[in-house]
Image: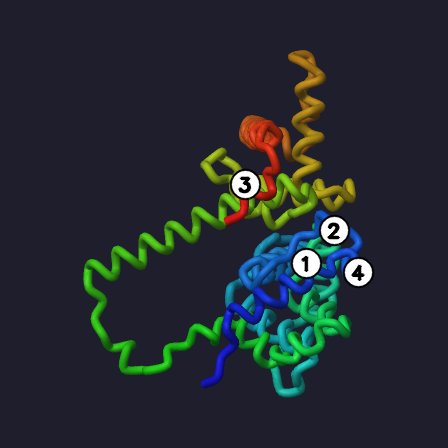
Amino acid sequence: MAVLNQKSVLDMIKEFRKNWHALCNSERTTLCGADSMLLALQLSMAENNKQHNGEFTVSLSDVLLTWKYLLHEKLNLPVENMDVIDHYEDIRKIYDDFLKNSNMLDLIDVYKKCRTLTSNCENNNRISPTQLLDFLSGTQYAVGDETDLHIPISPTSKYTQDNEKVQWLARKIIFSYLNLLVNSKNDLAVAHILNIPDRGLGREAFTDLKHAAREKQMSIFLVATSFIRTIELGGKGYAPPPSDPLRTHVKGLSNFISFIDKLDEILGEIPNPSQNLMP
């Protein structure tokens, strides 16, 4: 099966960055790949369920079903015979608003913007909507020879796979911290790192922050920062009102904001940080 090489997508992103000012309104816009798109969709569906059912939760089966439909719809591929869950239009609007408010573009948005560039026509024609669908769906990693699936995994290869997974997760966490420092509206970055390392800020804390951000029409990070700064400036005589859901997360949020402040100071001491921090 013909599959899309990752290099083609990277070339598309490079072309987009070259024409950044013509295609994007902000230099701090963040591009999100398949994993971030899927997380954004999951959060959007949980938010939709909160509005309709009162609980900020969503089942994995519903997320995967909607993920498949979203990719086809955004890429203008046939959806007539595909299943779709209730309130899809609401979910799509929440998803689009989430990316916009987070100052983010997903890969399909980047693809569509690149197609408008006459200078990129030749390069971009190498990627068809179906190929990009395969890339985002993960089918480009399909095993060419099915017999390989029956080869036993040795302890050494298992160790190598686990080690590569740990390295991948570590890079993802580091890049999420860097993304937040560059783009304070990046709610997906906050979702990845809010409780790494463990600060006692689990799903309940993220949900409370998400609701506060929606009420104040601010990013999650700015809500957390404003909340902690108010406490710090208020001194010992100030305490959040008992009705404030964030009250129970003061310690964890304080540790989180303090850590981000330290990272910001470190980056401020590095000459040309954008060059030194390139992977």
Helix, strand or loop under label 1: helix
Look at the image and tell me whether residue 203 can be seen. Answer: no
Q: Secondary structure at mark 4?
A: helix
Residue receiving disc 4: 22
Image: 155 above or below 64: above
Indicate the secondary structure of the residue bearing disc 3: helix
Local SS, label 2? helix
Q: Could you tell me the amino acid type at mark 4?
A: Ala
Real-space CA distance between mark 2 and mark 3, rounded to the nearest whole angstrom? 29 Å
How far across and how far down the image is residue 56, in percent? 61, 52
- What amino acid is at disc 3? Asn
Decide which of tag 3 and tag 1 comes sooner along the chain.
Answer: 1
| Amino acid on which disc 2 is placed | Asn
- For label 3, the residue is 276
- Residue 170 in percent (x, y) is at 43, 47
Q: Quadrant of residue 96?
A: bottom right
Query: Label for residue 17?
Result: 1
All told, the count of numbered labels is 4
Nearer to the camera, 200 or 120: 120
Which circle marks residue 101 in the picture? Answer: 2
Earlier residue among tags 4 and 3: 4
Q: CA distance from mark 2 to mark 4?
A: 20 Å
Q: Nearer the viewer, residue 52 or 273?
A: 273
Could you tell whether 154 is left or right of 171 in the image? left
